[in-house]
Every structure is written in C-alpha cells, then in structure tokens.
Image (cartoon, rainbow, N blue to C red):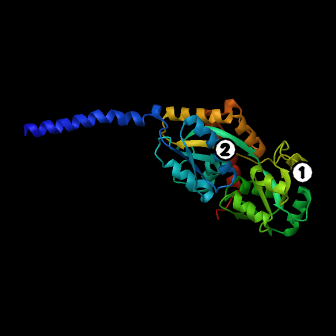
Amino acid sequence: MILLSRRKMLRLGIAAAVLPANVVSARPDAYPSRPITVVVPYAAGGPGDTVARVISERMKTALGQPIVIENVTGANGSIAAGRVARAMPDGYTLSLGLWNTHVSNAALYALSYDVVNDFEPVALLASFSSMVAVRKTVPVNDLTEFIAWLKARSGNATQGSAGVGSMGHIGGVYVQKITGTSIQHVPYRGSAPAMQDLMSGQIDMMIDAPVVILPQLRAGTVKALAVLARRRLVQAPDVPTADEAGLPGVYVSNWFGLWAPKGTPSEIIVKLNAAVVSSLADPTVQKTFADLGYEIPPPDQQSPQALAVFQKSEIEKWWPIIKAAQVKLD
C-alpha cells in the first residue's frame, strides 16, 4: 500500500511538472501560437470579404501566424456574429463586423447575443460611402431621371441588397422616404450575388460599396448615378455626389471593424490592435483600400476604445431610423 501511494505521488509529481509548460503555452504572452480564424458575415467577393483578406494578409506578417478567412452567410450577418460571440475568448476566432452586424441587426432581430456587451472591440478598419447603381438598360442618364422613372413604375422597380437590414437595404428605404418613391426590396446572401443579378438585368438598382460597383462601372455593365456622400470619389470623379445629383444631405456610408469574443484577455486585444495599426500603415494596404474607395480612419481612431465609442454613436443614430421605418424581416 505504501509502494502504491508512492507511485501515485510520483505520477502526481510528473503531472505537476508537466502542467506549467501547458499553462505557459496558453498564456496571452505566448499568443498567437496557431492560425487565427476571421469569420466574415457575407459571401466571398463582397466588400467585407475583400477588407478581411487585404488586412489579414498583412496582419499575418505582424502576428507570425496564418489567418484563415471563413465566410458564414445568412440573417444579415447575425449567424456569423453569433458564432464569434459564443466562441472561446482566446483570440483565435475573430469577427469581421460592420454596420449591419454590429448596429442594425440589434434593431431588427431578437438576437441571442448582445452586439455591444458580448464582444471586445479591436479596431476600426475602414469606411466607405455608398453608390447608387442601376442596370445598364434602365433608360435614364442621371439620378433625377431615375427618380422620375421610379415614380412612373408605381412600386414595380426592384432593388437588390446584401440582405435585410443591410446598409444597402436601409439606405434604399431612406432614399424612398426622401424621394417619395416605392421600390421592391430583393435581399441576397451578400453583395456579390446581388451584383450578378443587376448585371444580368434581373433587378433594377443597388445601393452598395464602391468595391462592388466600380469594377462593373468601368466594365460598362452597370450605370452609377451618384455617390451618397459630400465628396466625389477619387476613383470615379465623373459620378456626382448626392448634393449634386439632386438629393442634398442624403449620405449613406458603411464601415468595417474587428471584434473578439467578450472576455478575451486585454493582452491579446493589444497584440491584435497593434497588428491592425501596423497593417493600416502599410503603403500597399493603403493603396489597395484607396483604389477600392475605402477610407482608413486616422491613427487616433484606430484604438479599441475609439471603436467602442464609434459603435455607440452609430447605434444612437441609426436605431431610431430603422425602427421608425418599420422594416419587415423577410
């Protein structure tokens, strides 16, 4: 019995000796020691997917580990965001979030998670002003003519978007209210499939990101009637602003941020933020984003705290608009 007890003690001693090594490997200061997954809430080829791939390519150099992009579609991005909210808070599963997933969804869905309290902000990545694009065969040359065309259609025109509650959708609702028009909304699982149908003439219009619209504008497969912003895009200087096109003050923009699950150690958040900041300072990233029509936030707006403040301000601005519009989930 004494010998057995000594054997047990020996085994316990060996286990205790091995345990510190395991604990050390799991400490935040050893992070990251394996690939990181960034969950993107829309299909490959859309604005969110593009941002994730560009920033991740540079971040993997800063972090010394591969970053895997996983596209999880459905429910305006809430499925993807919910997956990250429930993930282990160890820094290996991150959320590429945007206005849709971290602002509008909470005003549209009965979510199983809180868009603020179940995430740790990492950094604001980029923003962009939306453009109004129509199929090539619509018989108009500018936004004023298009609004008249919409009114003549008596609610039979169609608008595609990346999903119910997306900025494109809500932006369309906003434009309808301002112009007194009626448009049928057609939700898709991302901007890319919606653009495919716009190019083929299956739908009449979209309000979406320059990265979605500019390639097709340059290819001559769609028409761009306006950028819903104060300034023209450098990448499309011939496309008028909302003010110039006849919709003064109608500005619709979206943005992208990076979040981790609630409870992720602050040391890991600091490392992730540093990787983002260095990536946004990279000339190649800056040129790529500029070419796509994205604006990188100034350095003082790239901290986790700045993202938290910005998200709160967006919620305070848009929730009342969404609820007043009585958007129906479909």
| Residue at the image point whose x is 80% and y is 52% from the top | 214
Viewer can see residue 5: yes
The Cα–Cα distance between marks 2 and 1, rounded to whole angstroms, is: 32 Å
- Which image quarter holds the N terminus? top left
Secondary-structure class at tag 1: helix
Front in this rendered view, residue 250 or 10: 10
Residue 199 figure quarter: bottom right
Q: Position of residue 217 (x, y in %)?
A: 83, 55
Contact between marks 2 and 1 (CB within 8 A): the answer is no
Q: Which mark is residue 54?
A: 2
| Residue at the image point whose x is 51% and y is 53% from the top | 112
Q: Nearer the viewer, mark 2 or mark 1?
A: 2
Q: Amino acid at mark 2?
A: Val
Secondary-structure class at tag 2: helix
Front in this rendered view, residue 198 or 111: 198
- Which image quarter holds the C terminus? bottom right
Q: Earlier in the sequence, mark 2 or mark 1?
A: 2
- Furthest residue in direction top, as rendered: 300
Q: Amino acid at mark 1?
A: Ala
